[in-house]
Image (cartoon, grey):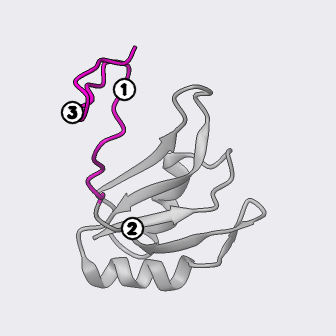
Amino acid sequence: MNIYVSNLSFHTSEADLKDLFSKFGSVSSVKIIIDRETNRSRGFAFVEMPSEEEGNAAMSGLNQKEIEGRALSVSLAREKENRSGGGGRDSFSRSNNKRFF
């Protein structure tokens, strides 16, 4: 079960989250999302628990629990949506066959 955890303190570590979630069962992995530019936490993470029962218990027990002065938001993670378009520096416009740089 993949669990989304938000409203994390910037000081919360992956080890802290693993310890917190381990009180409810086995934890397969913890991944705090890091901002590429600042190399700091973006304030959310994903926790993987192999047991759905333990994952549900963790979500119930930890949602809105205050950790390091912040109330955690803990819920079931959604599947990543496929994002189309957006292009980049070398986008190729199909409508007028021009390259944009």
* Residue 88: assigned label: 1
What percent of the width, then of the height, locates residue 75?
45, 75
User: Which secondary structure, mark 2?
Assistant: strand
Between discs 2 and 1, the one toward the N terminus = 2
Number of residues whose C-alpha sits closer than 10 Å to that of mark 1, classed few (under 14), some (14–19) or many (20 or more): few
Residue found at x 54% / y 54%: 44
User: Which secondary structure, mark 3?
Assistant: loop
Contact between marks 1 and 3 (CB within 8 A): the answer is no
Q: CA distance from mark 2 to mark 1?
A: 31 Å
Magenta: main secondary structure: loop
User: Which secondary structure, mark 1?
Assistant: loop
Q: Which residues are magenta?
A: 80-101
Q: In this rendering, which labeled residue sits more in front, label 2 or label 3?
A: 3
Between discs 1 and 3, the one toward the N terminus = 1
What percent of the width, then of the height, locates residue 95?
24, 35
Residue found at x 50% / y 48%: 15
Q: Residue furthest top?
A: 101
**Residue behind mark 2:** 3
Kind of residue at disc 2: Ile
**Residue behind mark 3:** 94
Between discs 2 and 3, the one toward the N terminus = 2
Contact between marks 2 and 3 (CB within 8 A): the answer is no
Number of residues whose C-alpha sits closer than 10 Å to that of mark 3, classed few (under 14), some (14–19) or many (20 or more): few
Q: CA distance from mark 2 to mark 3?
A: 39 Å
What percent of the width, then of the height, locates residue 38?
62, 27
Q: In this rendering, which labeled residue sits more in front, label 1 or label 3?
A: 3
Q: Nearer the viewer, residue 97 or 11?
A: 97
Number of residues whose C-alpha sits closer than 10 Å to that of mark 2, classed few (under 14), some (14–19) or many (20 or more): many
Q: Nearer the viewer, residue 31 or 24?
A: 31
Specify whether residue 72 is painted magenta. no
Question: Vertically, is 42 above or below 99?
Answer: below
Q: Is residue 33 left or right of residue 66?
A: left
